[in-house]
Image: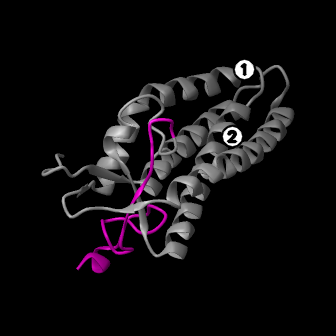
Amino acid sequence: MRAGRGGQGLARVAVVVRAGAAPLWWLGVFAAGIGVLVPGLTGRRIGVSAGAALFLVALAVVAYARRGRYRELARPAVRASKHDVLQDRAVSMRNWRRRHRWWLLLAFLAALGGAFVIPAAGGLLLAGCGVGLWLKASWIGRLEEAGEALLWVRVDWLSGGASSPVGKTVKGYRTTGIAAGDATPGGARRRASALT
C-alpha cells in the first residue's frame, strides 16, 4: 500500500489493538486444555485456581494499561487528508500477527512448559491477555463514538519494535468520519450491508 502526493498509509488504532486478541485467546485456551492433562508439581486443582487468578489479573492489566497515553494521542488528533490511504482491517490484522508470530509461539511454548509446574496457569494467563485486548479495543471504540471520529495511526510508525499504537515512535493520531473504512468503532468487521 502506498500513499501518494504526500499522504500516509493509516491503520485503525482499534484494529491494531484487537489483532492480538484472538491469537492469545485461542493459544491460551489450547495451552490450558493441554495443561489440565498434566498433573504438574502443584496438582491440577491448585494450577487451575492459580490460572483463574492470573486470568483476571492479566485481563485487568491489559485492558486498563496506558489508557492515558491513548487519550493523550487522541486529543490533538488531526483530520486525515484526502491523500491518506486507509489500510483494510484484514491487512492491519495480518501485518500485526506476522510481526508477532514468534512472540506468540514463544508465549505458547512457555505456557505449555509451565504446565509441568503449575497446570493450566500459563494458558489461562495468555487467554486473559487476549480478553484484555478485546476489552481495550471496545474501550477505544467508545472513545471513537464519543468523539464521533475514528482513530488512525501511521503505518510506518508501526513497522518496528513492539508495533504498538502508543509506542514511542507514535507522535499522534489522525481521524476520519465514523463511517470510514471497513471496521466499526472498536475494530470489529463492518457488516457488508453497512458498506453499501
User: Where residue 177 appears, x then y in whole percent?
Assistant: 36, 73
Please indicate whether residue 177 sits to the left or right of residue 147 in the image.
Answer: left
Q: Main secondary structure of the magenta part?
A: loop
Q: Is residue 112 above or below residue 26?
A: above
- Give the magenta part as a residue range: 167-196
Closer to the N terminus: mark 1 or mark 2? 1
Quarter of the view holding residue 120: top right
Residue 113 lies within the magenta run: no
Q: Residue at x 52, y 44 (%)?
A: 166
Please indicate whether residue 38 sits to the left or right of residue 34 in the image.
Answer: right
Q: Is residue 152 above or below residue 194?
A: above
Q: Judge by depth and name the residue closer to the eye, 171 or 67.
A: 171
* Distance CA(mark 1)–CA(mark 2): 14 Å
Numbered label attached to residue 116: 1
User: Where residue 130 appears, x then y in whole percent?
Assistant: 58, 46
Local crowd size for mark 2, using a 10 Å CA cut-off: few (<14), some (14–19), many (≥20): many
Q: Residue at x 31, y 79 (%)?
A: 194
Query: In the image, what residue type sits under mark 1?
Result: Phe
Please indicate whether residue 79 sits to the left or right of residue 133 in the image.
Answer: left
Q: Residue at x 52, y 66 (%)?
A: 141
Q: Judge by depth and name the residue closer to the eye, 1 or 128.
A: 1
Mark 1 element type: loop
Nearer mark to the viewer, of 1 and 2? 2
Q: Is residue 23 above or below residue 118?
A: below
Residue 182 lies within the magenta run: yes
Instruction: Tell me the residue that label 2 is attached to.
Output: 124
User: Where residue 126 appears, x then y in whole percent?
Assistant: 63, 38
Q: Quadrant of the C terminus?
A: bottom left
Q: Residue at x 43, y 54 (%)?
A: 173
Query: In the image, what residue type sits under mark 2?
Result: Leu
